[in-house]
Image: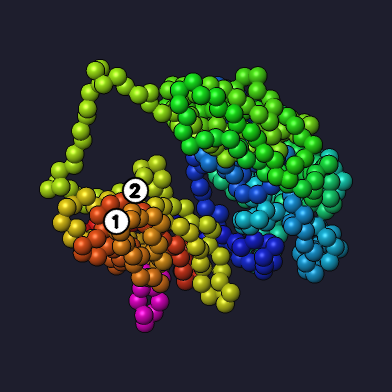
Amino acid sequence: MNASLRARGFAALVAGAVVVAGTVLAPAAASAAEKVVLSKGHTDAVDVHYEDGALSLKVNDDTVSPPVTRDPADVTFQVLPEAAMAVPDDPRFAFLGPAGSRIWLLPMTQDPDLLWPGWNTTTLKSGMFEGNKVRLSLVDVQGPGNVTLFTQDSFGGPIVKFRGDDGLPDAIDVPVHTHAHSNWAFSALGSYTLKFQADATLTNGTTVSTGPVDYSFVVGELPGGGPEVSLSVSGMADEYQPNDTVTLNAVQTPQTELDHYHWFSKCPGAADWTIVPGEAGASYSFTATRQLNGCEYVAKLYDDDHAVAATSEPVTLWVAFPPQDPGTSQTITASIDGTQGALLISVNPDDRAVVLPPAQLNASGDRWESNGELRPVTVTDTRAGQPGWSASGQIPADFAGPDGATFSAGYLGWTPQVLTQGSGQGVVAGPQVAPYAVGSGGGLGNSAVLGSAPGGAGRGTAQLGAGLRLSLPTETPAGTYTATLTLTAI
């Protein structure tokens, strides 16, 4: 579980304070080769890679799950109209324009209703480059207005990283294993092309460069944009017999003039979606076979530039087993021994790391605070006697940070939740545990109940979660801190 301290977003409060930007490792991402528009959610817009002796810039698209790696040429970054704000009446921000004039700003702290772009070097290995760093440059800006990327100091003052109206290129040195965000400010509506470049020197003295790479931004509505369209698939029956005809239809809401589609399938055991050859219309028909049982299908709608305008939710094909000749069949009986059973608590080994958002000053300015979510915890009880159970969590050791700095695990509290449970399990969430406060105690330094089931119930599988709240004194040293949460069930 990681916690870091950093400023609140510029759009939320100009006078926010910065302690430090924490390092977050990006997950491995699959590759995608379709044109997309990214308008909400997290993305490492300038994602630096080094493979086979070549330095390159990619886009790590974290708006989808799992994340995918994209070519910048396939991505349009949209700054939605909702990003509009007035330039503060503060001389420190005069570089953005006259006080009260309008800009469109993507803040350095996440707003779920806007795009949250950053830059990323977490895929780069230590010891590969001189100084363990690369140089990131903004070499050119083309568009109807000015573009400025800036962070803020501990007093809320701006620290300009890249500025397009005072002479380019602008460059910053970025250490490897860095994941960072800034405020992205645009002074006018319209389409922009930002040219970024990464350069580095290998430890053997060889220099490598990406050369200028174009990044496309649209501030405001997309050109020719009408109402946002959604896509669904109709026609999938609950079950088919072998050799039945399956006819699927892609349905737009609202209906538009777009009429170019592609269909994709993914069958059990396959890792990726596969395009269905020759199917580019709103209707797709094929024959149901036992080999297709459990396969999923999606439709994608494309605009005139062959960018994805909408994607449907998957639908699944179920094909019945053919009837068997009684003279050549066998009866198989399965049973569960009611005298056996166990109580197990587990987490997904691929989903067990919690990275709290950068801490922000609270409204009264006397605490650093951050909120996040515990990853799902699964409790399975197969005991026949149904004695009930209780699942608890505790952080037995302090959070550890840089240079031996620590803070008490008690400064983290939680609000437990029951995410799912079986019929009749009777599982209830544990009580809220507030972060430690002088005179009242609290926090997860002591064991706290996450969820429980009463005697006579509890048999089955339940999934538990919790909202996390970190509240620290303002004198806590800057840095990224880590601790381990221990889970038990009895």
Residue 473 forms part of the magenta stretch: no
**Does residue 454 appear anywhere in the picture?**
yes
The percent position of residue 413, horizontal first and vertical second, equals 40, 67
Residue placed furthest toward the top: 328
Mark 2 — residue? 347
For marks 2 and 1 on the same chain, the one whose residue lies earlier in the sequence: 2
Magenta residue span: 435-444
Q: Is residue 10 left or right of residue 65?
A: right
In the foreground, 47 or 415: 415
The Cα–Cα distance between marks 2 and 1, rounded to whole angstroms, is 9 Å
Using the image, determine if residue 11 lies above or below residue 67.
Answer: below
Residue 437 forms part of the magenta stretch: yes
Residue at the image point whose x is 51% and y is 28% from the top: 266
The percent position of residue 103, horizontal first and vertical second, equals 80, 57
Mark 1 — residue? 487
The percent position of residue 24, horizontal first and vertical second, equals 51, 47
Residue at the image point whose x is 33% and y is 54% from the top: 422
Residue placed furthest toward the front: 326
For the C terminus, the quadrant is bottom left
Which amino acid is tagged 2?
Val
Q: Are marks 2 and 1 in contact (CB under 8 Å)?
A: yes
